[in-house]
Image (cartoon, rainbow, N blue to C red):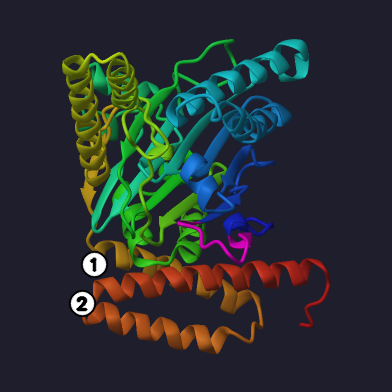
Amino acid sequence: MADNSPRIENPLSEAPANWSPVVFAVACSDIGMRRANNQDSYAIVGASDADQWQRSGDLLIVADGMGAHAAGELASRLSVELIPHHFSKLNTKLEPSEALLRAFEETNREINRRGTVNPEFRSMGTTTSAILLLPNGGVIAHVGDSRVYRLRGQTFEQLTFDHSLVWEMQQAGEVSEEMIRNSSIPKNVITRSMGPSPSVMVDLEGPFPLQKGDRFLLCSDGLSGQLADEEIGSMLGLLDPSTAVKALVDLANFRGGPDNITVVIGEVQRDFGVSSGASVGGPTRGLSGFPMAFGLIAAIGLLAAIFLALVQQTPLAILAAAASLIALVTGWIKAAVSHQTPATDKGFGKAPYRKYTCRPSAGFASQLKIAVEELYGWLKDNSKSPQLRVLSERIEAANRELLAKDFKTATASFAKLLVEVMQEIRQWRKEDEEGQVDY
């Protein structure tokens, strides 16, 4: 077991009392079972009011650092700190998607500069995946093999392309999925990262229209390397976000935890109004959504009509007034259509790259059962926890659900038990190390 408890945070829970955030977000990061330090970083930057939500949305980021002991940790930390900083400045002048892209590029240059001037940090790098959740949709910027997923109903989709040797070879048609599973091709060799070079190619994906209930999950490969996509999607759908981040990390650790593990989940928790002020791209419009070009034509036509009427050019004045009226009506029609039909076409990328239907299964529920019973056995043999009896009764109840073939309920029950047993083990070991346990 990892001696330290995972860090779990929900910065958006501190929103002002007069603002109900559109997105509920929570994160969990853990060192894993075999690493000396945690080189993963994450950021949750939420809107503090309705106006900021319309302009800037909510930004979720995960980064997985690479390099010597301190270098990877620094690279990932710089990534999640500098991207929000640059985005905030650039978003006042650029469309949000362009501002996010430029923020990645500026951050890459800074990480590269830090690595160049300090021999300790030379060639440091980091993967970085971010999703910007806006009224008009979610936009993803991505470098490396940290992933972004979306769960809508039972459909679970991977929205990012892994910049890894395996994925690049598969895209080129050099290997098949079956060959990857049965071969010794290294699955953790990445082909693109932020920091090693002054410039970097950033993938943009989206915009993905948002619906109430949508859940987006960002993770480092410490999670995706230990759990199948279908397992991630199943737990994401059956558990509340706060429980899901802990259960996912705990299961990855139970399966060996060879790497740092970071999970960020954002859930769209209420309906919201779409505003043209939060567009992710497209033609420039006025504050009300009225096309600026038609507004200028209408204004010029009206001024021309007034002038021609004053110089007693009545026929020409009537024509100018008619042109102004036509421009005005046409502009209002276009604005109304645009308002009623939000853009749903993906402007960037080719996502989704993988798609699954997540249904509870006997196999996954049984795997969770095995994990829980093994961990409970360790706790029973090595502690005098007062929770042993309660946990035993709940394990028996979950086993009855499994025998009744209620795989949905059984999967959720065992996943929650996994979290509680792991928490009890951590607490008992902590007390034991501090000499507080009376044997």
For mark 2, give the secondary structure: loop
Q: Quadrant of the C terminus?
A: bottom right
Dots 2, 1 in contact, CB < 8 A = yes
Residue 279's x, y, as percent? 39, 35
Q: Is residue 173 visible?
A: no
* Residue count near mark 2 (Cα–Cα under 10 Å), binned few <14, some 14–19, many ≥20: some
Q: Does residue 331 show up?
A: yes
Residue 259 colored in magenta in the image: no
Q: Is residue 142 left or right of residue 313?
A: right
Q: Say which residue appears at 43% left-offset and 66% top-offset.
A: 240
In this rendering, the answer to whether 355 lies above or below 423 is: above
Q: Position of residue 13 (x, y in %)?
A: 59, 62
Closest to the observer: 343 or 170? 343
| 237 is higher (above) or lower (below) than 335 | below
**Disc 1: which residue:** 362
Q: What residue did someone put label 2 on?
A: 405
- Please, what is the three-letter code of the amino acid marked with disc 2? Lys
Q: Is residue 317 left or right of residue 431?
A: left
